[in-house]
Amino acid sequence: MEYVKKFFAMIKSWLQRFWVWFKPHWQTFRKHQKHIWKKYHVTKILVLAVLTLVLVMSMYLFYLAKSTNVSGLKVGLEQSTTIYDKDGDEAGQLNKNGGGTFVSLENISPAVVDALVSTEDRRFYEHRGYDVKGIMRAAVRKVVRRNNSGGGGSTITQQLAKNAFLTQDQTLTRKARELFLAIEIEKEYSKDEIIEMYLNKSYYGSGVWGIQDASKKYFGKNASELTTDEAAVLVGALKGPSIYNPIDYMDNAVNRRNTVLSVMVDNNKLDNDTAQNLMSGPIELYDAYTPDEDTYRYPYYFDAVIAEAVKKTGYTDADISNGGYKIYTSLDQLYQQGMDHAFSDSSLFPPDASDGEIVEGASVAVNPKTGGVMGIVGGRGEYTYRGWNRATDSYLSPGSTMKPLAVYTPALEAGYKPDDMLKDEKLDYYDVQNYSRTFSGESSMTDSLIYSLNAPAVWLLNEIGIDRGFKKVEQFGVKLDEKDRYHGLALGGLTKGARPIDMASAYTVFANEGVRQDTHFITKIEDPNGVIIYENQKPKGKRVTTPEVAEEMTSMLQGVYSSGTGANAQPYGYQIAGKTGTTENINTDGMSKDQWMIGYTPDVVVSTWIGFDKSGPDHFLPGNDSSYISNVFREEMQSILAASPNTPFSVNDVTQTGEYEEEEETPSQNWKNPLSDVGDKASDVGDKIKDGASTVGDGIKKGADKTMDAMKGFWHKVTR
């Protein structure tokens, strides 16, 4: 203890000596500072800077308020945002977050208005959107409490602005925007219209929005029939729907109701005796609310529509869902229903894992002419609103579905033919095995493709040049990593993987005469007044290969489903082209990790995947023969093709004719743009020049490639 006292005494003595030394220097500095401050008018400069900042911020907030579509607010609340399919028919509505039944003010009990004004904004009919006294009171509370809690200061108009256009964040910026928007709302609407919109827009707890649905939910009656004490209950719930609704928190609701009744007495809207009598009575509940569950009819598709609308317009999720917009899409309801039916049939899928984890799946159907998504399924099991969509969010190992993109298309462009013989043997530069674990010495390009042989694909990629294959895959719209520039690219050995929607977009090239279409869901969005705010009616495609190469690929890819690896998935009575893909589970010998099937006709491209979200020793697909995904895919395609135009292929199945053969074409089909031919020939010449350079480069890098390939050679064990 004595030692501690001596230590602190020493510190104190040292500080005193330091201050004696430092004090003259500090005084000199302060004197000099005051001189500079006075000489350069620093105080005036700071005041001017603050005022300038306030002016700039005010101008910015004014601009934001003016650019907000305040005039469409009421129409948007009266109408639900509606989704239309490719034919312009209504497919459903987006009312997941605030789409309550709208009722006019004349159909709302006057007691509700009296309770609301008394509780939330006594000077509502006097101010112009903001209450200076209320703002001052809120500011004082903020200083005292030193935080943003407690609210206060917000008028009914400001709360409407917040609910309709802003987030619930308690920040000064949001409060400032709320103020400017309230001013604009007051300019546009009468007081009665503002009250009407506020009561219809607000959340009352228990999953109900709007005064009408809240009345049905809690009291089994229309909003026009609410009594004074019932009105007090609903208005009281607005302060905190999660803790003041009478279904979940009856005691809280009773106390809050009594508070509202007391405030109504203070505001001369209710006499004290009546209030006391109402306070002594219980809250009688009766639930007669029946939500319309069918409006959000196609959950994964509608989720994707909202996401795309938010991205394209800059509006929020709530803006889109509750703004009364008309959103026109590429949806084909019959396609979507067929896909939903297939994914809801558990008998088509492998059994759950030993730990109860279900086999997941995803599928997307795309119009190859436009890129419009006509149907989508993002998963199995329990659906979560705006949750994970595996068709658009999951990057998965594509396996052998990559072979047509990385190997066979660029090979045809380089001059190879479908009947050319490829080497099917052990390679000294890359360790690769066929699924059968045998080699035949050589195999035609067609057989190598339709039977998904690995060794010929790797050999051919090496012959045409890895760089050529790498660049071609990127032209197909699949994003690659630099680490993917190796022989395993032929087998789908990607660092990151590809999404089902990416693979569907890539295969539109073969179904659309060599032109790839970016996928999209929305074709047009109209606001409640009919003004088009976004349009994508004529999407532009990107040429990836020539029509001739696309036809050659289609001729071969038909063989995949007529006699190759996809034969078990061929829909009865229909002809399709495409590719299968399987990756092996490295933790369990002979079992699958991912199973893919991509199939197309001139009318539709369907990309389907099944597997576990996380692969592992206990998470695998039984067998390695694509039997389960064949069932799912065949079921999907049977429904989709039954509803499609069934446009015939322009080329025959090469395995059925013995050689590549075009069907007889009409004069309009025979016509080709001369400029397109010139461009294609120029592209071929350029590719040949690049081939020469690539060959030289490959020779130089051969030693380095061997090292890299040795490290990555294990990929053959997990793909076919």
Image: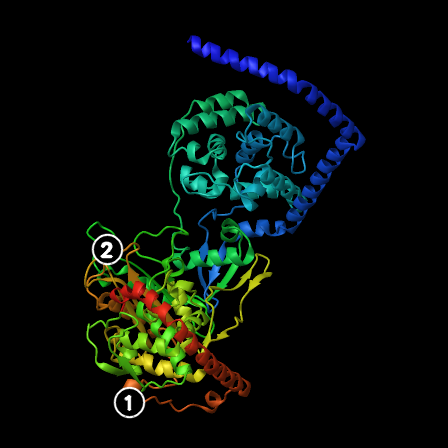
For label 2, count other residues whose C-alpha is less than 10 Å away and answer few (under 14), some (14-19) or many (20+). Answer: many
Q: Residue at the spot x=43%, y=56% of the render? A: 303
Task: Check the image and report above or below for 152 versus 560.
Answer: above
Task: Check the image and report above or below for 292 versus 515.
Answer: above
Q: Residue at the spot x=55%, y=57% of the render? A: 313
- Residues marked 1 and 2 touching at CB (< 8 Å): no
Q: Quadrant of the C terminus?
A: bottom left
SS for callout 2: loop
Relative to 227, is 646 on the left or the right?
left
Task: Check the image and report above or below for 212 versus 633.
Answer: above
SS for callout 1: loop
Q: Which mark is residue 658?
A: 1
Relative to 433, is 187 on the left or the right?
right
Mark nearer the N terminus (1 vs 2): 2
Kind of residue indicated by mark 1: Gly
Residue 336 in sight: yes
Q: Which mark is residue 619?
A: 2
For label 1, count other residues whose C-alpha is less than 10 Å away and answer few (under 14), some (14-19) or many (20+). Answer: few
Residue 414: quadrant of the picture: bottom left
Q: Position of residue 715 (x, y in %)?
A: 29, 65
Q: Position of residue 524 (x, y in %)?
A: 53, 64
Q: Which mark is residue 155?
A: none
Q: CA separation, marks 1 and 2?
A: 42 Å
Kind of residue indicated by mark 2: His
Q: Position of residue 100 (x, y in %)?
A: 47, 47
Q: Quadrant of the N terminus?
A: top left
Q: Nearer the viewer, residue 342 or 451?
A: 451
Q: Nearer the viewer, residue 99 or 366?
A: 366
Q: Nearer the viewer, residue 73 or 690?
A: 690
Q: Nearer the viewer, residue 490 or 593?
A: 490
